[in-house]
Image (cartoon, rainbow, N blue to C red):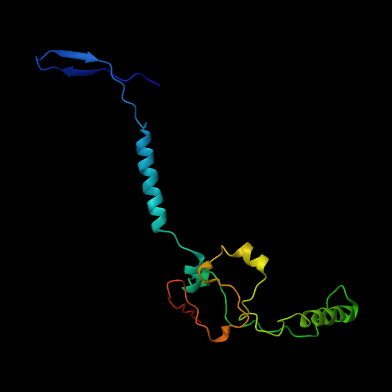
Amino acid sequence: MSNPPPSRFTTGNQTTHERLTTNTVGLVALSDFRKRRAEVLEQQEREHYEFYFFIINKTLGPGNRPLFNYSVEAPPKKEEGGTEAGAPGGLLHRAGEQERAAQIQALEGAQDDPNMTKVVDRRWYERNKHIYPASIWQEYEPDKDYSKEVSRDQGGNTFFYSR
């Protein structure tokens, strides 16, 4: 690093003095860093979005495709008759499917619409209650008719879900 050139100063009695001064370029004080950090954080807060914003507004992504392509309709059921390479003729595969289907049908609530089912295991609830929308979680009451209930947040505002 080279030495900086000397600076000339003139005093009030018109005498000239030469003094070596150092001007450091690029070094800033800690308060400048704190100020800049506050500005960056403030800017990030203004530009903060949640996944909910993109899902509800059906935001388009690359290729004009929705970022979250969720549908309220159930996916179409797969056609029977396809065979897999591991099962000759598909006989073993189909027998296993029937056995699993019988086990699933024996479960409580298997016939209910999965989109409308809101009853969850307490352990799952305790593990996931921090996830949005936590403000509308409520304890299950067996005597309450949930089919006619309107979803509202804690402020009393009604949720409107678009199709």
Give the image location of residue 146, x and y in percent. 57, 83
Q: Looking at the picture, does residue 124 appear above or below residue 36?
A: below
Q: Residue at x 61, y 77 (%)?
A: 118
Q: Residue at x 28, y 16 (%)?
A: 20
Q: Looking at the picture, does residue 12 appear above or below residue 30?
A: above
What is the tally of numbered marks visible in this picture? 0
In depth, the one of 6 and 120 nearer the eye is 120
Q: Quadrant of residue 111?
A: bottom right
Q: Residue at x 41, y 50 (%)?
A: 41
In depth, the one of 16 and 72 nearer the eye is 72
Q: Residue at x 36, y 33 (%)?
A: 29
Q: Looking at the picture, does residue 82 appear above or below residue 31?
A: below
Give the image location of residue 26, x and y in percent. 36, 32
Q: Looking at the picture, does residue 14 appear above or below residue 57?
A: above
Give the image location of residue 120, x and y in percent. 65, 72
In depth, the one of 142 and 10 nearer the eye is 142
Give the image location of residue 122, x and y in percent. 66, 68
Q: Quadrant location of the N terminus?
A: top left
Residue farthest to the front, as pictured? 143
In the image, taking residue 23 as reference, residue 62 lies left or right, namely right
